[in-house]
Image (cartoon, rainbow, N blue to C red):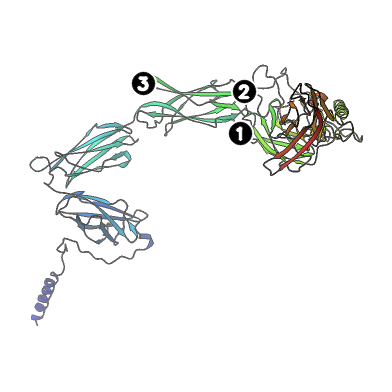
């Protein structure tokens, strides 16, 4: 009975010995590859790796050597992940081999062997878990020659300022104290990349390898290490704050601000930058600011200490020193000077000019321009012309409040594409006017009646004369906006004071149909009395037209009227004679007339040419009409726009031939083209016959 336990014990020992043939505490195949359990661990989303960090026991190894490579796994909370399968790969399998995979241990680290071959160079190692791959590959340098035994690292200089550089030198010796073989690779690394950067890998020459360190803008002490094979050493470099050495102007935004109390943007942010000798921003530098302006109450220091034009500030972490300019009541340029003092030396810089202006429009500086002064409205509906208003404040600054609304109204004959437009940053606003119907008929003035009588007597004695009057072709455009009445600032304080003279204006804008510069109300009288004129009921809104109130107004509707001449075809052509007879060696003077039905000249570009079949012709034989939008103001001025004179002469004085028949022809080529698609043209001729001896 005692023999049975002995048999069992022997069997147990035998089995354990047999098992030892198949397992080992440090399993390895013939190639040196570590064998691991390749069973994938099933990971939940809460333990999925988000970062794989790679490291190695040695950053450089000689030929036919082995070092360990470690992959540390972290989840999204920074917790180490055990039990995950990690796959390893290298970019240069001709230089080395690496264990294919390993499972991370309890410390979240998977370790494999990296073995070099007999070729020098650099090998980059990557690790993968599922679809996640390590970020920056791990580099291991393979070198040949004698194994390095000692390494000494030094820096020149040992202290640098922001942005400065230092040369780091590594001296590598073998076991005999001799320089290692030329080309031995040395790896340089920095302990904190926030302090700067350094050349990564260098090779020795006569046992020396060098790298360049470049400092960032963070002060402190940085450690630079150098390794060759399994040996390494380090050196410390101090990074120093550099003193301020310059100040520069950065910006002034905006460069144009409005007068105080005008309702626009009244402040500008002005910035300067303090830098050290390396161009790195300097924080905490004391900056003195001085302002120069038009002395209208503008200020940069609102502390109430009695120094509105000076202030002392400090630069921020970006080296920026900034100050707010506040406008006053006087327009003009402002400059700001910033200064720093370093080692008893003062350095200053000026800002760009900031313009204080942008007040409300002034009635005296409110005007308009018209692209086409004469439009063919009697012949065509839809002919276009552009009207542009120009505004400035009382100081003449055209950068009035951006977005100021300008309103328009028209007499019949024209219409506007919009009732209200806004000004741009240059105080300009434009609209398009088009022809539509004809202007209001107005009662003729005395000079118009005289003109009609003269034209009938001298050019159309038998009738068929123009039926209208010149001012019947004028169509007024009313333009108005909120602004102030002009005043003379006698004490130059930028404000209206008692005793300052001003130009009083009508309270209610009106469209001046009859061009007499005052409002015409409805009288109930039938034509030829003038029609009632459109007006805008402004302050006070009482349903009646209000004239001038006798006081200076800072906020009212200021306005103007601009006329456009609306004309027809120049079909009224005649001369002061129906024939001519030029004697031998003599001449005959002929005056001819051209107008539309209102005794107005045709549109610009219309051409008049005069030709003659026999004899010589002098005088106004070729004319092109210009842009005009005025009539009168007396009958002779208007007549000058409509009449032309030519002289017919005998071309062969002294000849004995009989007088020859001759024909003088007046040709009027009328035309109009605009961007709206209007394209009009016609030709009208008038003939006069006579003789030339």
Q: Earlier in the sequence, mark 3 or mark 2?
A: 2
> Observer-nearest residue: 296 or 89?
89
Q: CA distance from mark 3 to mark 2?
A: 40 Å
Residue 514: name its quadrant. top right
Q: Report x, y in % for residue 153.
A: 19, 38
Q: Which residue is mark 3?
A: 343
Which residue is disc 2 drawn over?
330
How many C-alpha atoms fall within 10 Å of the one at disc 1: few (<14), some, or many (≥20)? some
Q: Residue 29's spot in the image, x, y percent?
A: 16, 64
Left or right: 367, with 15 as reference point: right
The answer to whether marks 1 and 2 mark residues whose Cβ atoms lie closer than 8 Å is no
Task: Work out whether residue 619 or residue 488 is closer to the camera in this orientation and state it.
Answer: 619
Image location of residue 134, percent across then percent down: 31, 54
| Residue bearing mark 1 | 425
Density class for disc 2 (Cα within 10 Å; few <14, some 14-19, many ≥20) is many
What is the CA distance from the residue labelled 3 to the residue labelled 1? 45 Å
Q: Which is more N-terminal, label 1 or label 3? A: 3
Q: Residue at x 28, y 52 (%)?
A: 137
Q: Extreme front residue here?
A: 656
């Amino acid at each position: 009975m005692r023999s049975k336990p002995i048999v069992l014990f022997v069997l147990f020992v035998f089995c354990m010995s047999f098992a030892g043939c198949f397992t080992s505490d440090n399993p390895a195949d013939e190639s040196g590859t570590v064998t691991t359990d390749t069973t994938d661990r099933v990971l939940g989303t809460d333990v999925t790796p988000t970062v794989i960090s790679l490291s190695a026991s040695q950053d450089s190894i000689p030929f036919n050597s082995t070092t360990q490579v470690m992959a540390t796994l972290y989840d999204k909370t920074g917790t180490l992940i055990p039990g995950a399968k990690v796959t390893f790969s290298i970019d240069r399998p001709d230089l080395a081999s690496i264990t294919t995979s390993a499972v991370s241990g309890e410390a979240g680290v998977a370790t494999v062997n990296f073995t070099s071959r007999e070729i020098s160079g650099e090998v980059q190692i990557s690790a993968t878990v599922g679809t996640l791959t390590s970020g920056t590959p791990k580099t291991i340098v393979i070198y040949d020659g004698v194994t390095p035994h000692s390494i000494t690292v030094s820096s020149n200089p040992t202290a640098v300022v922001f942005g400065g550089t230092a040369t780091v030198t590594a001296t590598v010796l073998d076991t005999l104290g001799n320089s290692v073989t030329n080309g031995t690779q040395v790896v340089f690394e920095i302990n904190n990349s926030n302090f700067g950067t350094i050349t990564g890998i260098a090779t020795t020459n006569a046992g020396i390898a060098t790298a360049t360190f470049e400092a960032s803008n963070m002060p402190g002490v940085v450690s630079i290490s150098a390794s060759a094979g399994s040996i390494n050493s380090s050196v410390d470099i101090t990074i120093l704050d550099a003193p301020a050495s310059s100040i520069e102007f950065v910006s002034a935004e905006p460069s144009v601000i409005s007068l105080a109390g005008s309702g626009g943007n009244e402040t500008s942010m002005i910035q300067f930058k303090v830098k050290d000798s390396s161009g790195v921003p300097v924080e905490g530098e004391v900056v003195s600011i001085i302002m120069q302006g038009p002395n209208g109450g503008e200020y940069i220091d609102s502390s109430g200490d009695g120094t509105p034009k000076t202030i002392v500030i400090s630069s921020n972490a970006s080296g920026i020193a900034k100050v707010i300019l506040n406008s006053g009541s006087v327009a003009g340029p402002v400059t700001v000077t910033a200064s720093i003092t370093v080692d008893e030396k003062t350095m200053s810089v000026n800002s760009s000019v900031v313009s204080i202006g942008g007040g409300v429009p002034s009635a005296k500086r409110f005007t308009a321009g018209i692209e086409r002064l004469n439009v063919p409205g009697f012949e065509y509906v839809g002919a276009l012309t552009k009207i542009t208003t120009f505004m400035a404040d009382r100081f003449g600054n055209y950068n009035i409040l951006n977005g100021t609304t300008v309103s328009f109204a028209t007499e019949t004959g024209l219409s506007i594409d919009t009732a209200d437009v806004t000004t741009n940053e240059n105080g300009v606003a434009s609209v398009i006017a088009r022809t539509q119907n004809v202007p209001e008929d107005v009662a003729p003035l005395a000079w118009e009646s005289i003109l009609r009588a003269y034209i009938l007597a001298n050019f159309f004695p038998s009738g068929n004369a123009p039926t209208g009057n010149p001012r019947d072709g004028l169509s007024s455009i009313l333009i108005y906006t909120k602004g102030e009445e002009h005043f003379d600032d006698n004490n130059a304080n930028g404000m209206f004071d008692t005793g300052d003279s001003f130009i009083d204006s009508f309270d209610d804008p009106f469209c001046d149909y009859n061009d007499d510069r005052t409002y015409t109300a409805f009288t109930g009288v039938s034509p030829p009395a003038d029609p009632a004129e459109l007006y805008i009921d402004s302050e006070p809104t009482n349903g009646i037209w209000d004239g001038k109130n006798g006081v200076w107004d800072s906020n009212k509707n200021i306005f103007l009227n601009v006329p456009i001449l609306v004309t027809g075809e120049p079909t009224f052509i005649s001369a002061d004679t129906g024939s001519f007879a030029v004697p031998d060696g003599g001449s005959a003077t002929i005056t001819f007339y051209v107008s539309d039905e209102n005794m107005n000249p045709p549109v610009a570009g219309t051409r008049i040419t005069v030709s003659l079949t026999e004899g010589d012709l002098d005088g106004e034989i070729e004319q092109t009409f210009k842009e005009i939008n005025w009539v009168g103001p007396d009958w002779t001025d208007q007549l000058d726009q409509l009449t032309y004179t030519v002289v017919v002469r005998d071309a062969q004085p002294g000849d004995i031939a009989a007088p020859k028949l001759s024909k003088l022809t007046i040709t009027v080529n009328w035309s109009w083209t605009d961007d709206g698609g209007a394209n009009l043209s016609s030709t009208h001729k008038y003939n006069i016959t006579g003789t030339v001896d």
